Amino acid sequence: MGRPYDSELSELSETYSWANTIDLPSALVRFPETTSPLLAIGSGGSLTVAEFAASMHREIRKKVAIAATPLEVLKTQLNLRDVAVLLTSAGGRHPDVLGTVEQTAIRDPRSFLVLCLRRESPLADRARRFANVDFLDFKPPVERDGFLATNSLLALVVMLARAYEGTSRQRTDLPPKWTDLVPAKAIRALNKRMTQTGTGNTLVVLYGPSTRVAAVDLESRFTEAALQNVWIADYRNFAHGRHHWLAKHPKSTSVLAFVTPEDDRLASATLALIPRSVPVVREDIPFSGSVATIAALGRVIHLTGGVGTKRNIDPGRPGVPSFGRRLYHLNAFGRRSVRPPDLVAIERKTGKSVDRLSADGLLSYWREAHDSFRRTLLKSHFKGVVFDYDGTLCGETDRFGELQPAIAAELVRLLQRGVLIGIATGRGKSVREALRRTIPAQHWPGVVVGYYNGGDVGLLSDARPDGSPTAGATLAPIATVLKANTALRHLATIATRLPQITIEPLRPIDTEDVWTIVEHTVATLGIPGTSAVRSSHSIDVLGPAVDKRAVLQRLHELRDDKDSGLLCIGDKGRYPGNDYLLLAQRPSLSVDECSIDPSTCWNLASAGSRRVTACLQYLRAMKTGRQGMQISTLPNRIGSERPSR
């Protein structure tokens, strides 16, 4: 099993160059911009990658982030709905990885990125069943690791470093060559010093914040290749009792300390207090941040080969016992657990786990509310449907293009059968142009579009909206204050229209800061009737009486019937989302965020589906007859079909 470790070491330069220069896919570039906490999942060598991603998320995004194994994730009741999840795999075949991607996807994480360094793996087949999973596979120049994850680990870490550093205002670009990070001279010197420490049974590895990932990887490599017993500690945790090991076992223990410039004072003071009878190797890493992390990782990878040679063990093929193979391929998670659709919907609605609701005595209440809403929805007849646009009919990648063919086909089907269509959007003529390219002209008189969050309403056939770049009289004072805010000018663009002001963050990671400024400004000025709402990509300040329900009024006028049933569908049903008033109508459906109102705004899409894919499920459940449109039984399966592009 495996291949010679030396051959893997000889390929590191090529792997590093590839990972450092490849064009990163947009899904990977966008992922670090999430405003959510991060859960990074990995086993074996992939756990090192998970630790690295978590450290980057904490350092650059300033958000809580943890690394965990599949067992830790799947056997706990973590609520993932407001969490970004990362899962990485070198080969995409292990049962733990396959079970994890499925069981995690159906728990509706806020975002879910899966990276695999093998084309068309079983992991690809599993991940692509879920529309809420961004799956990326690559073909690196070195396609197969030995027993230890080596080149795959380096490739994933470098790509993640580039993605995260791209979100930082203080970027630290990686050196162009592997030898710039890990000089051969430094490796020879480290191996020599480690050889001189003897062959003690225990190696204590001390580290600072930037080198923790390297220490984790060293413990993994030395243990998996049976090179040496290793335990690790940061410089201060070492001081809390762990130093006692050295007092009792000085002859069988040695110390390896990774030291960056930021660690120097603390590391030097710590090492000076270790008894002279304990061999200490200090390895200075002349870099900072993520560059220091990768430089230390490189030293660990090479050191593993050196210690393996010293102990006559090839880490690339150390020999695996038969029970080890059986352990590795054990299907630890068994069959997938299919969660009832009502429980999925209830957790989406409340933001709490079923176990928590049961403990609070509220589960039966929400089950009754869900069943009542579903019965009402399925027996209702509708003359028209009002959709939000961005995040509902249109995905992020198609935002300034045409609607996806599957969505367009369903809209046209409904129009052909006499169902009126309303579209409420925060945008202007770009939506009109996209809709006109998608929907045949003969159906335009049956489509009502509410531009600027309902501030400018007309038929798709009309020459609307009014794109005058001047805020209305009520909004003008707010626009003046926002444009004068120096911090806001550095974080976002500001566009004015008669009914609204649109503030769009330059980077998604700045969205919360932008929202704080805008919300504070609107609240403190206190101009009657004005409000601020959020969409999936912008923050809008609305003038008096501007809201998306204006589209419903216009549809009623087209039918000359105020009692015509209209179904509303959007993605931001929770205040201050820009669909919260639209989805307060009864009944309404959400493709993402729900309000807490038990009588409406439920997300009934299948587990693992959200946004455009959830909307497509709703559309395909719409059947037409003499009394209008009716929702048939909604999907209750796991997974979903992705819309075609």
Image (tube, grey):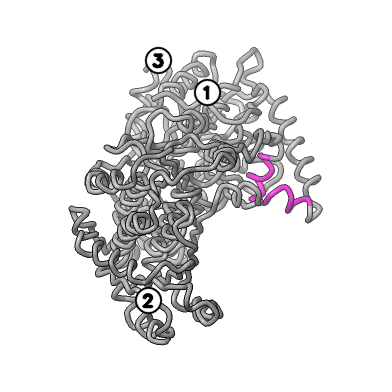
Q: Quadrant of the N terminus?
A: top left
Mark 1 sits on what residue? 420
Q: CA distance from mark 3 to mark 1?
A: 13 Å
For badge 2, the amino acid type reads Val
Is label 3 in a helix, a strand or a loop? helix
Contact check, label 2 and label 3, Cβ < 8 Å: no
Reply above or below: 580 against 372. below
- Residue drawn 31% across the image and 71% down it: 283
Considering every residue shown, the one lying at the far front of the view is 312
Mark 2 sits on what residue? 280
The answer to whether residue 518 is seen in the rendering is no
Along the line of sight, the residue nearer the viewer: 326 or 639: 326
Q: Quadrant of residue 280?
A: bottom left
Image location of residue 97, percent across then percent down: 52, 40
Q: Which mark is residue 442?
A: 3
Q: Quadrant of residue 459?
A: top left
For badge 3, the amino acid type reads Gln
Q: CA distance from mark 2 to mark 3?
A: 81 Å
Is residue 357 covered in magenta? yes
> Reading the chain from its start, which is encountered first: label 1 or label 2?
2
Q: Quadrant of the C terminus?
A: top left
